[in-house]
Image: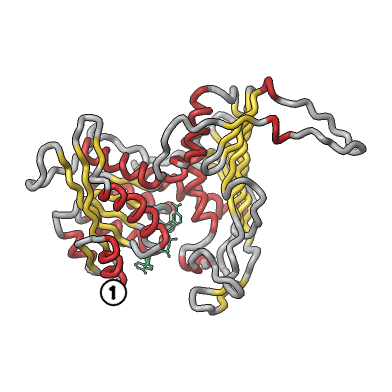
Amino acid sequence: MSLPTIASTEATTPATRELGIIMNGVSGRMGYRQHLVRSILAIRDQGGFELADGTKVTVTPLLVGRNETKLAELAERHGIEDYTTDLDAALADPRWDIYADFLLTKARAAAIRKAIAAGKTIYTEKPTAESLEESLELARLARDAGVKTGVVHDKLYLPGLQKLKRLVDSGFFGRILSVRGEFGYWVFEGDWQPSQRPSWNYRAEDGGGIIVDMFPHWNYVLEGLFGAVETVYAHASTHIPTRWDENGEPYAATAEDAAYGIFELEGGVVAQINSSWTVRVDRDELVQFHVDGTLGSAVVGLFGAKIQHRNATPKPVWNPDLADDHDYEADWAPVPSNDVFLNGFRQQWEEFLASCVLGTEYEYDLLAGARGMQLAEAGLRSAREGRKIALAPLSLD
Ligand SMILES: NC(=O)c1ccc[n+]([C@@H]2O[C@H](COP(=O)([O-])OP(=O)(O)OC[C@H]3O[C@@H](n4cnc5c(N)ncnc54)[C@H](O)[C@@H]3O)[C@@H](O)[C@H]2O)c1
């Protein structure tokens, strides 16, 4: 089925499609660095990008936020003409084709509802809403309004995970048995050193918690690489009960800061993923996945990837009386890049914008986003009830 394309404006030549993008939440961590600077401005400053048929896609951002002074400063710093604190007026203006949302999670659904009602194409950070019900409601509203949607799936675009996908697709692993993921680092409490994450992340009442933050990512990573998640068991802990906020005031951390999850995937693969803001790193990268298959194994991170084939597998014998001097690290071979990897957020933006112009189906839509929220909600429920939760396939009907 082909979806409506974004019509070219009169001012553009047939070979150029200029897309106006409302960017809401650009003062935030993700909105500013990844979406504005590393994606949209990088595309703008390069003069746009080209589709396979030679069509050039260019972008014009409109900055939206609550603080006019901050927006004016950002606009000035980056040579952006348009900014406003009036979202409704921006949505009513046909000059802007796409509504992009990087707000804190709690504020997202209300803004997306308005943007759908205004007939805008939607591109949003995850999680798409605070509950599965609301995520599905947004996906249905968009479908009924005939509005195209995209949800950030950035981890799939990490160089390490792209190499992993290549390994999976090549059949390197044989039958994949298990996946172990380790994600996390120490997030300072905020008393003697400022915290490096916003305080709302640690308050359940403000949409915080590592399960809602990370399980949507794990859902699309597992689904995209190994198979859909069928069940989840999660143990959640709030290891640090008091933290200090942006003003140096102590507050009660009401959301979990660590989640220990086991996921059963279609086809029988077992994945275990630890997600934690309360661990000190002793790995090569802040996220690492170890995949074992009958024919080979791989360890991948954000960038790096190494493999061990069955023919290079050592034969250790357990003997607690003898110090083991085998260099296990040396049994692994690096996987070459063989490609140039763009910033993952930008790569996904380009794919989404291309899909908007070409009117093709876009896989990572609000229904995919809802599946991420389904896993987060099931993870929270599993932690509350202390049992494994099965996930039913989602549909919009
Ligand atoms: N894809 C990823 O890897 C990734 C990583 C971190 C965060 N995120 C997601 O991105 C979103 C933003 O996270 P962040 O870390 O950038 O947060 P942040 O706190 O740095 O930024 C939040 C933005 O929302 C705005 N905002 C805050 N309260 C608001 C309100 N009541 N109404 C309207 N706007 C409001 C802020 O001004 C700011 O622009 C979250 O949904 C988060 O889950 C995604």
Left or right position of 36 against 57: right
Tell me what residue is drawn at x 59 percent, y 31 percent.
Answer: 268
Total tally of numbered discs in the picture? 1
Q: Residue at x 33, y 48 (%)?
A: 139
Give the SS element for disc 1: helix
Q: Is residue 109 above or below residue 233?
A: below
Residue pointed to by mark 1: 69
Residue 86 in view: yes
Q: Quadrant of the N terminus?
A: top left
| Quadrant that contains the C terminus | top left
Q: Quadrant of ligand 1?
A: bottom left
Instruction: Residue 186: give x, y in percent of width and height.
Output: 61, 60
Q: Nearer the viewer, residue 309 or 104?
A: 309
| As drawn, 253 above or below 36 | below
Where's residue 305, x and y in %? 56, 36
Residue 384 showing in the rendered view: no
Residue 351, quarter of picture: top left
Quadrant in the picture for residue 174: top right
Q: Is residue 169 left or right of residue 243?
A: left
Furthest residue toward left: 10
Q: What residue is shown at x 60% (from left), y 43% (from top)?
A: 181
- Residue type, mark 1 in image: Thr
**How did the renderer colour the structure?**
secondary structure
Q: x%, y% of residue 89?
A: 18, 64
Say which of 110 and 65 sits in front.
65
Residue displayed at 28% across by 74% down: 69
